[in-house]
Amino acid sequence: MEDIGATAARLRSAAEAKPMRLPVNRRVDETHHAVTPDGLSVWYTIQVSPHSRIQEAIFERANRMPSDEECRPWLDLLIAGAQAVEAPGLPGSTTRRFEAFERSPEREAPLA
């Protein structure tokens, strides 16, 4: 398995090259996915719409929820130019999801 920096760079490159258009069918291909030697599954996608861009990182383990110590180094390498916020999860889940929203207000419809 590649080191974390090289793997994160590969995931970012795949997401930049093939961002998902919103609204989106949540099907993600394997170029956006990596599994570490110790079993941490890492997904990274970029979703775009005419007025926003969402970076999303998902961490998953088969037997337990990934720790902050496992997720933080990946988030620092994957989420660029924004602060990632953890999305609420279900009790007992073995998955953690982080999102960073970037908006372009000048391209949004004006509020009435």
Image: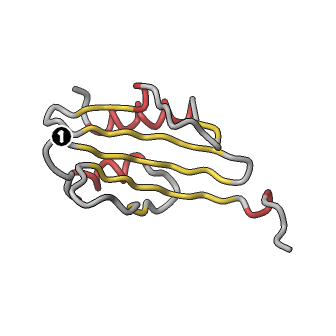
Rendered residue at 25%/53% (across/down): 93
Image quadrant in which the C terminus is located: bottom right
| Nearer to me, 27 or 110 | 27
Locate the N terminus and report the quarter of the image it occupies.
top left
Q: Which corner quadrant of the image does residue 103 belong to?
A: bottom right
Q: Is mark 1 on a helix, strand or loop?
A: loop
What is the x, y in percent for residue 81? 52, 56
**Disc 1 residue type?**
Ala
Nearest to the observer: residue 31 or residue 95:
95
Q: Is residue 34 above or below residue 83?
A: above
Name the residue furthest front: 91
Measured along the vertical axis of the image, is residue 101 above or below residue 30?
A: below
Residue 50: percent from the left, percent from the top? Answer: 74, 48
Measured from the top left, where is residue 101 in percent x and y? 56, 58
Place of residue 76 in the rendered image (x, y in percent of width and height, measured from the top left): 36, 53
Q: Is residue 37 left or right of residue 87?
A: left
Depicted 34 relative to depicted 77: above or below: above
The residue closer to the viewer here, 61 or 90, is 90
Q: Is residue 52 left or right of residue 31?
A: right
Residue that numbered label 1 is attached to:
62
